[in-house]
Image (cartoon, helix red, strand yellow):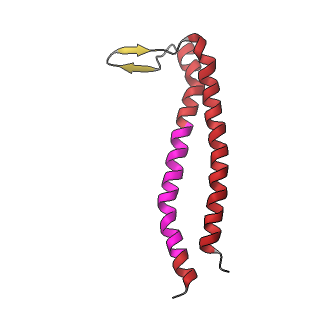
Amino acid sequence: MDKHTWLAILYLLLQFPLGVIYFYVTIVVFAFSLSGIAIPIIQGVFNLPVGNIEGVHYYVPTLALPLVVADGILLWTGYMHLAKFVGKLHGQYAKGMLVSE
């Protein structure tokens, strides 16, 4: 019947959806940033199209390749800063839920 026990159980139940969201967002951002960094290799070295919709092959223009790589690097760097901020917020949330007065 202790308040701390119920808060710990609530914290445990909320951890599952939060963990799934954290994992999903991390994988999606990593995939997009890695694809942006790898497009020059895929397109230049292996001569593969970036997209193929209804039989039409799509390539990134050669002059835009440095921008695509820079976007991939900036996306991952920005996400790491966002993850650090979310980690601080999650730490405060965990402290509020799990640490007794």
Q: How many marks?
A: 0
Asked whether 10 falls inside the magenta stretch, the response is: yes
Place of residue 59 in the rendered image (x, y in percent of width and height, measured from the top left): 48, 14
Q: Left of 101 or right of it: where is 44?
A: left
Figure quadrant of the C terminus: bottom right
The part of the chain drawn in magenta is 8-30
Q: Left of 71 or right of it: where is 58?
A: left
Place of residue 73 in the rendered image (x, y in percent of width and height, measured from the top left): 65, 31
Q: Residue at x 58, y 25 (%)?
A: 38
Q: Residue at x 60, y 26 (%)?
A: 37
Asked whether 87 falls inside the magenta stretch, the response is: no
Q: Residue lying furthest top in this view? A: 62
Between 46 and 1, the one nearer to me in the picture: 1
Q: Residue at x 58, y 81 (%)?
A: 4
Place of residue 100 in the rendered image (x, y in percent of width and height, measured from the top left): 65, 79
Q: Left of 2 or right of it: where is 52?
A: left
Q: Left of 88 or right of it: where is 45?
A: left
Q: Residue at x 54, y 28 (%)?
A: 35
Most common secondary structure along the magenta stretch: helix
Residue 7 falls in image quadrant: bottom right
Between 36 and 86, the one nearer to me in the picture: 86
Place of residue 72 in the rendered image (x, y in percent of width and height, measured from the top left): 60, 29
